Amino acid sequence: MDKIIAVAIDEYQSQNISNLKNCLNDINSLIGVLTENYFDDPELTLYHKPEQTTLSFLYNYLNQEIRNTLDDDTVLIIFAGHGDYNSYLKTSYWYCSDSDGNDPTTWFNLRDLIDFFTASKAKHIALITDSCFSGAIFETVRGGGINALAKKKSRQALTSGGIETVSDGIAKNSPFNLTLIQVLSSYDKQELTFNTLSEETIRTFSEDSRQTPQFGALSHTGHEGGTYIFRKKQDNKKLAISEISLRLDIDPKIKIEADCKLPFFNDVNHLESNFINIYVQQLGYSIINEVRKYMVDDIDYAIERSEEIGFDSQISYKIMRDDKNYLSILIEVGQFFGTAYPNYWVETLNFSFDSVRKIQLGDLLDGDAKKIIENVIDKYSESDCKEVLKKCLTYELINDLEFSLIDKSIFLYFYKMLPHALAPCGCIEIPYNEEGFQI
């Protein structure tokens, strides 16, 4: 199993640590290149929200993720954020979202990460870290043929600099990230070893920069002289979409089956992937945060009730339309928390590529929005649903009405406005040529 664990920290609680602006962009750009060119179906986990990037969270979950690997697994860990260095202890650190820049006990010690690598059963582990002072973790690397290297265990790292500060970048990506993406995108051989990736990144990196990327093996971690290998996809296997998993991360005493799968879009053709991925991730986390809040508000009830009956929280997606004009994403949410009925509703994200923007229903209507929607309810909804749906409508609500686009029609979703008993009334389909619609 190929695993990618990505951590991006732009926001810091402490006033003595400045916020960054490009870490999530960097991570999304790099994941996009990797999943487009090298990975068919990786297990992909991204941590970037403040509550997911605290010292306690990162320590526990990186330990768990790396410890639970199997013998044939390959693990790629990517970090973008602030770092620091203790010259007395000769140790590199990451700043976490809750770190205090004046208190090293609140920093993530990279020696702990190396200990996790040592205990892991995984065949290959590689670390790419774009942070200050991250280069104090290496021993020298050795060569060898690809087949021999692939059979031996490896524990390697590539960092954006040595024991020095590094740039977050002026535009959307850091200089290190841009160089890394350039190498991964342009490499034309079938197999790219981690050693070669690192060497090419260093060779390609601007000579005018004040930082110098470094790479090497991680000493005393079980490294046996092997190397992580990126294998190019065949052209007919390239996918525009990969999957990302989001964790619920609530009290483990709550018994809940939880699964959150969301799309991750690669840089292909018309797709502005970073712009879209951030919207998708924000929506996914907003749903998850509501579940967390519900559980925390009455934690004792949640623990007791889930023991009795078992809770369930599922988030899945469908790509309804993806062409040169529109991208339409349907997010389906199903939840059961011990109530009389399970909850089901949908969220939608729709993008127009004429000017690369997120669109709302009002952008597709030409005329009095309320009258247009009332008219299509009369024409296309079931007879016993018409009056119920009309009562839901207000001018303020219409622009927030969920909708999806397919080739020749548009779906309107009323699920969030209706009680469970009226859920069958929650969706109507309307042809594009309907009066008042401009698609």
Image (cartoon, rainbow, N blue to C red):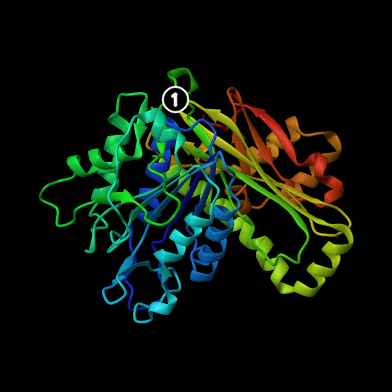
- Confirm whether residue 68 shows in the render: yes
| Side of 16 where 294 appears, left or right | right
Could you say where residue 378 lies in the image, as x and y percent from the top left? 75, 35
User: Which of these two is toward me, 343 or 254?
Assistant: 254
User: Which of these two is toward me, 389 or 407?
Assistant: 407
Which image quadrant for residue 149? Answer: top left
User: Which of these two is toward me, 260 or 366?
Assistant: 260
Residue situated furthest left in the rendering: 208
Which image quadrant for residue 137? Answer: bottom left
Could you say where residue 233 lies in the image, as x and y percent from the top left? 44, 25
Q: Which residue is mark 1?
A: 233
Count up the numbered dots: 1
Q: Residue at x 44, y 76 (%)?
A: 106
Q: Residue at x 55, y 60 (%)?
A: 63
- The kind of residue tagged 1 is Lys
Could you say where residue 363 lies in the image, as x and y percent from the top left? 50, 40
